[in-house]
Image: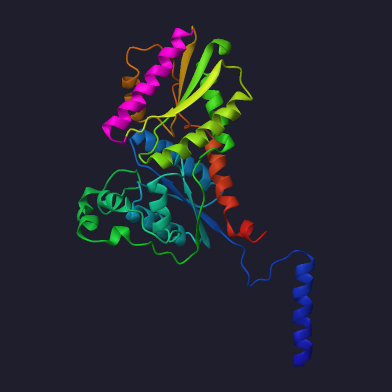
């Protein structure tokens, strides 16, 4: 009798495989998205939340606002686990992967062995918790300052993977082409200047510029502007570096005007919420045009997050 039962069980499993079915004991993966985003103004945060809400219609999604804010990340992970996900894909909604913020997030997620030095600074900003709206919970200010907890790797009962930030993804060029077109009048007599925030370290800045060069190349093949240029502002760098970036930007715009063309300043920013104001100050007195929005809002960003989550799920990694 025992041999007969074993034979029937084997037959059932082979039939399930033949018809592409999964045995009941093997559940299909249920990924969740941990959307990592820099907290900003209420308007900025709402743009991020809209992306998260749209992704959530397809994949369980929770947002963690902050630089590398452990408390916010842990809270978002806990919410995903409560929603019965079997794995988590962290998707950094950041312009570039080449930053100490991304390195610090990877360390907290247990995906990087060495702790970045800048994590100490981010931990000092943690103050215990970021609210769901991206604002700071000042009632818990002592949490990060009083201990090293904000620098300890996160706890998760399910596996965590991490996608890349936007970098030179083709969707960035797609959106920036539309932003430039929104202010273009005579492309043959216009010069597009892509402007990004940029990092502090020189090595990281070279990587940012490399990706921006790839984006510019993609834009050139599909547009007819006189030229497409790019640079980083390096807002957080020391004054000499920051001032040099400002001078470079102003000189580029002045040269465009002297050549009889019009400068189209197209910010490579996720969303407007303050940085563009500083950009305008740097351009004070110069002639240029700038679009009314950055990468967000745009539904293509939702598609990018969904694709990033799917491409980094265990199902893809296992070739399923």
Determine whether 250 is above or below 146 in the image. Answer: above
User: Residue 270: where, in percent of width, then height?
Assistant: 44, 34
State the residue at coordinates (59%, 35%).
170
State the residue at coordinates (26%, 61%).
148
In the image shown, does 58 or 223 lie closer to the viewer?
223
Q: Is residue 64 left or right of residue 211?
A: left
Determine whether 216 is above or below 317 in the image. Answer: above
In the image shown, does 40 or 22 lie closer to the viewer?
40
Specify the quadrant that holds the N terminus.
bottom right
State the residue at coordinates (62%, 58%).
317
Extreme residue in the bottom direction: 1
State the residue at coordinates (65%, 71%).
24
Specify the quadrant that holds the C terminus.
bottom right
Name the dominant secondary structure of the magenta segment: helix
Determine whether 212 is above or below 136 in the image. Answer: above
Determine whether 162 is above or below 260 in the image. Answer: below
Is 316 covered by the magenta stretch? no
In the image shown, does 158 or 25 lie closer to the viewer?
158
Q: Is residue 310 left or right of residue 122?
A: right
Displayed quadrant of residue 5: bottom right
Residue 21 appears in the picture as rendered: yes
User: Residue 7: where, in percent of width, then height?
Assistant: 79, 84
Magenta region, residue range:
236-259
User: Residue 117: where, in percent of width, then height?
Assistant: 32, 53
Is 246 covered by the magenta stretch? yes
User: Residue 194: where, in percent of width, then height?
Assistant: 47, 26
Residue 184 appears in the picture as rendered: no
Q: Is residue 319 left or right of residue 273?
A: right
How many numbered circles are shown?
A: 0
Q: How is the image coloured?
A: rainbow
């Amino acid at each position: 009798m025992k041999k007969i039962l074993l034979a029937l069980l084997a037959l059932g499993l082979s039939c399930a495989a033949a018809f592409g079915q999964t045995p009941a004991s093997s559940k299909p993966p249920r990924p969740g998205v941990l959307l990592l985003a820099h907290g900003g103004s209420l308007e900025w945060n709402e743009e991020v939340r809209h992306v998260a809400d749209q992704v959530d219609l397809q994949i369980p999604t929770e947002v963690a606002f902050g630089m590398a804010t452990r408390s916010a990340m842990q809270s978002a992970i806990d919410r995903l686990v409560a929603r019965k996900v079997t794995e988590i894909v962290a998707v950094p909604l950041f312009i570039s992967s080449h930053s100490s913020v991304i390195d610090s997030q990877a360390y907290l997620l247990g995906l990087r062995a060495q702790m970045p030095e800048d994590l100490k600074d981010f931990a000092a900003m943690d103050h215990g918790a970021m609210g769901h709206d991206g604002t700071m919970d000042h009632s818990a200010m002592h949490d990060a300052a009083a201990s090293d907890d904000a620098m300890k790797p996160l706890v998760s009962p399910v596996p965590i993977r991490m996608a890349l930030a936007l970098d030179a993804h083709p969707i960035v060029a797609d959106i920036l082409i539309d932003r430039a077109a929104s202010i273009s009048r005579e492309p043959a007599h216009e010069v597009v200047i892509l402007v990004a925030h940029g990092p502090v370290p020189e090595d990281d800045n070279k990587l940012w510029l490399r990706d921006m060069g790839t984006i510019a190349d993609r834009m050139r093949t599909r547009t007819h502007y006189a030229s497409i240029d790019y640079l980083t502002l390096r807002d957080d760098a020391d004054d000499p570096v920051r001032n040099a970036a400002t001078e470079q930007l102003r000189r580029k715009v002045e040269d465009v005007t002297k050549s009889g063309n019009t400068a189209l300043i197209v910010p490579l920013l996720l969303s407007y919420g303050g940085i563009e104001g500083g950009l305008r100050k740097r351009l004070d007195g110069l002639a240029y045009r700038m679009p009314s929005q950055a990468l967000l809002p745009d539904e293509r960003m939702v598609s990018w997050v969904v694709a990033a989550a799917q491409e980094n799920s265990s199902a893809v990694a296992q070739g399923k």
